[in-house]
Amino acid sequence: MMIAEFGHYALVLALALALVQASVPMIGARKDDPALMAVAGPTAVGQFCFVAIAFAALMTCYVRSDFSIVNVFENSHSAKPLVYKLSGVWGNHEGSMLLWVLILSVFGALVALFGGNLPARLKANVLAVQSSIAVAFILFILVTSNPFLRIVNAPLEGRDLNPILQDPGLAIHPPLLYLGYVGLSISFSFAIAALIDGRIDAAWARWVRPWTLLAWMFLTLGIAMGSYWAYYTLGWGGWWFWDPVENASFMPWLAATALLHSALVMEKRDALKVWTILLAILAFSLSLIGTFLVRSGVLTSVHAFATDPTRGVFILAILVLFIGGSLALFALRAPLLKQGGLFAPLSREGALVLNNLFLVSACATVFIGTLYPLALEALTGEKISVGAPFFNATFAPLFIPLLIAVPFGPLLAWKRGDLLGVAQRLVGAAGIAVITMAVVFAMEGGGPILVPFAIGLAFYVMAGALTDIVERTGLLKVPFATAFARARGLPRSAWGAAFAHFGLGITLLGIIGETQWSLERIAELKPGQTISVRRYELQFDGVTTRQGPNYRDLAAHFTVRRHGDFIGVMEPSKRSFPSRGTATSQTALMTRGVSQLYLSLGDPNADGSLAVRLYYKPLVLLIWFGPVVMVVGGALSLSDRRLRVGAPKGARSKAALSPAE
Amino acid sequence: MTRRQRRFSLIGAALGVLALAVALVLSALKDSIVFFNSPTEVVEKHVKPGTRMRIGGLVKEGSVSRGEGLAVRFEVTDGKRTVPVAYQGLLPDLFREGQGVVAEGALDSTGTFRADSVLAKHDETYMPKDVADALKKQGHWKDDYEKKLGATPGGRTQ
């Protein structure tokens, strides 16, 4: 019965350890005292253990349906399936903050365990900075969002989790997203440690890049997963709404993508140091801003924020402290960092700078679109909504030049590139693009010119991504076996870049297909009637009711025929949850290749007819398949020997680092 | 190229992209934002018919009526004023009388708001009022609920 108190106590102990970890190693690094610096490792692991105990305690309360805990009472129900009892732990404010802190401590512990070859001083500073973030957020939980509070007279039954969240998506999406979001804290800590120490070299980038890459991979998957979840759960087939909550995760992604690329320049050419540090700070700052937006209540209403400001003001204070503090430190220390490696504007470095410029500008427009309405409401009281039209008008024009430039980057030589030569090598890719454009244009029979252009652009990006690999393996010139052998010999990071860029093209193709060719049919059907889209005909056979563990399901049965041939059934349903008095729509999806039929239910009418919404979504699965390919690219790059976390580094890097010991 | 020329071309590129971004943002802010009004503001500001906007409030109890072919009419209220809304299409799951709603569209000449999209406002900690009162009686109460209710735009009944 004391599990909640036990968890609470563990969290307090984690705070105490975090305080030690945030201060002692840093003092050690200053005084050059190895014993004090060595405190960082064990405290990081200990902090992780205590946070994990606290998290496990809360999870146990959920599994046992202990409704004497307010948090469990408000968000759980005894009849809820186990998977939602587990994932329900982070389906609410308090629990999700605890998950945030858990992941923060996981990353700290990973650096402590796998950072054996880090210079002691850098490691001590990194872990101390990492822990200062933990101090702030554990304090936030304990003071404003304690998940372990009790109710005096325990209710018999809980209020259940919001039905919309009772979905496998909840089990996967927030943890992935947080792994990405919070994972960026590592590159932030490295950046601050470098600034504190006043020294930074190419080896620094070699450590930061894998961590950023790892966080970026999780963030990519998390965003894609969230998008797919919104797509099938909301019932109107949208997969991206430019909603502030989505933007809150997208901004760190853009910054992290820029950081990955600039860290590459720093690692290879020892250039762009100051910029890379700034990006590392910005990327995590955007994560913090995202946390603030989502967790302070400021999004639902500025007034809500004003009436109950405790949480919001606390997170705002954390924001000001960390973002303001790190930028101030940056302003003080950055001029001390020596600039290295010169390069011509037309070079791979130049291309990566261009990449960074566009990504950061795109990120800035998203930032303005997300925060402008909040600022305007706070200042003038005027309420506006900045929606898709704004972002389409700003984000797309900034991304198109970037996409055109993407294939050029990997083909340009370091230091000084030959633009004309690269353009000649991309003739093949451009040719494919032009042919695709012509084919699409002919198929469309006119229509907006933008569609064939965009499809052509997607094919150009994909073909361009493969150009480097095809050339280096000599695929079209030498026997296949030779090309295969050469392909195996290529560095994994080259494959990584090709996959990641290819994935970008795939996503683009999916986005164009879905937005331009999607078809919608809405109708009210009585049993026996049909609704059709493209070559598909759906016949409504009737409804049945089913009883689930904590809901009732009203399922509609449809027989799907294509050109009159039976190809399957679809069963969308309306699920009502008596504990909350609310209902959700369960969409039925039928996958045809990479396209989908999408069927969702409206309300049943008094006359026995049923409102349905049917979509044909061409190429829609590519939207989420693209990010998966990007992540495979990230994993390939991560497995490159050069980057492997904890792998022995070459003699050169050791030598370069020795002065820091 | 000299070092100065290199630096100059980099800064030039940066300023170019930045200028592009600023121009895009400014033009988009002019054209593509939509103002949000409560029913009281719609009435008091005398918003012209045809102006795109969002209105938010509670769906008035007993006001929902359905017509032919997915047409639906309801009234949005903020406790002081109400605005009639006409919409054609499927309503979101959480749409219900007495609940918060946001509609986007424009007023027609008769003063009816023609909505082309309807969003039901919801929140992860929605709680029926009687449960909230019960919790209050138990002496255990987080101000969360009122905050969240205030979150439904029109829920701020004065």
Image (cartoon, coloured by chain):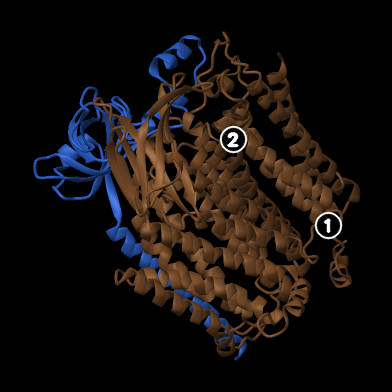
Tell me the SS state at disc 1.
loop
Amino acid at the residue labelled 1? Gly
Residue A491, numbered label: none
Q: Image height check: is A329 above or below A202?
A: above
Q: Residue at x 44, y 19 (%)?
A: A578
Q: Tell me, yes or no, if residue A314 can be seen here.
A: yes
Specify the chain shown as blue. Answer: B
C-alpha distance separating marks 1 and 2 = 31 Å
- Measured as percent of width and height from the top left, residue A363 is found at 49, 60
In the rendered structure, the residue with mark 2 lies on which chain? A
Q: Nearer the viewer, residue A312 or A470?
A: A470
Q: Colour of chain A?
A: brown
Q: Nearer the viewer, residue A69 or A574?
A: A574
**In which quadrant of the rendered view does residue A18 lie?**
top right
Q: Which residue is mark 2?
A: A96
Report if the CB atoms under discs 1 and 2 are less than 8 Å apart. Answer: no
Q: Image height check: is B18 above or below A60?
A: below
Residue A646, numbered label: 1
Viewport quadrant of the C terminus of chain A: bottom right
Q: Nearer the viewer, residue A292 or A35?
A: A292
